[in-house]
Amino acid sequence: MAVQEEIQIVDRSQFLPGGRLGILLIHGLGGTPVELRFIAQGLSRAGHTVYCPQLAGHCGTPEELRRSTWQEWYESVEQAHDRLKQRCDIVLAGGLSMGAILALRLAQQRPDDVHGLLLFAPTLKLDGWSMPWYSRLLQYVRPLPVKLEFDLPEHEPYGLKDERVRALVVSAMQSGDAGQAGIFSTPMRSFAHLNQLVSAVKKDLDQVRQPALIVHPRHDDMASLRNAQYLQANLGGLVDTVVLDDSYHMVTLDQQRHVVAERTASFVSWLEGAIAAKAEVARLAKGAKAD
């Protein structure tokens, strides 16, 4: 009699309960919620509720990631947003790299329930200075019936200028624990789904009218500053852009992470005040009309 092996799925999501303002932070392709922990903890100390969900297919093996689709990643985001809405009156969505693009998709699909955006090194195209020449061709890859089985290995500097943090991340990847530092190689099929997600989001960027904070490094090794410039020019609402001068792609972990945390906290505080002021004006207008 065959014995069926039980596979235990570990959820690496992080939920930090707090006040009535909730912040959804989404990790990148092949990444993990850990890459947003520093920013999440800072926002939590400010009294906010923060949720960093694990996306479908992530924090496991390359094969698990290969089998997942961008629609499944986005479904993970919607489920996390639903959880935040149950306890929060105001919800901001944000993320790192591909996570920022998923946040934009959520803002498009749920415009009345996403009140602001936090976009860290948003990645529409892999065109950073360390990317190999063939990465320029990746943007044209789309999901096909033919299986795309080969993977693209991660390489130096792994999105990190801080050598100490880079060594820790590489050590965690080499340990085989994908829940701590992601995986060492990303399936080509996953890049195909990323491209399909980007195409869907770019169609209606001007319909995204929520205030947005963009934080992007000038010397991004994976996704050049042109990604941020494109969003700044095409988003339909107020955009506050911060350009970092001493970080690579993983801005939430790299050596200017404190700057990222401070600017994020300031933006969230400003937006919370702006929403409260707008509500007060509406209340006074309603009272004057009643009189």
Image (spheres, grey):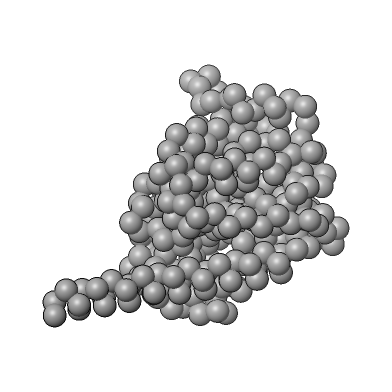
- Whether residue 79 sits left or right of residue 134 in the image: it is left
Q: In the rendered view of the protein, which quadrant contains the C terminus?
A: bottom left
On the image, which quarter does residue 204 sit in? top left
- Whether residue 54 sits left or right of residue 185 in the image: it is left
Q: Which one is in front, 43 or 150?
A: 43
Residue 148 visible in rendering: no
Where is residue 282 drawn, in percent x and y?
28, 71
Q: Residue at x 48, y 68 (%)?
A: 271
Q: Residue at x 48, y 58 (%)?
A: 211
Q: Which residue in the rendered view is the most extreme toward the right?
A: 163
- Whether residue 48 sits left or right of residue 182 in the image: it is left
Q: Which one is in front, 12 or 211?
A: 211
Where is residue 205 drawn, in percent x and y?
46, 41
Q: Which residue in the rendered view is the most extreme toward the top?
A: 146
On the image, which quarter does residue 151 sit in? top right
Q: Residue at x 74, y 56 (%)?
A: 244
- Whether residue 168 sits left or right of residue 6 in the image: it is right
Where is residue 272 drawn, in percent x and y?
45, 72
Q: Residue at x 51, y 80 (%)?
A: 47
When the figure is inspected, residue 256 is found, relative to residue 70, above or below; the finding is below
When the figure is inspected, residue 209 is found, relative to residue 280, above or below; the finding is above
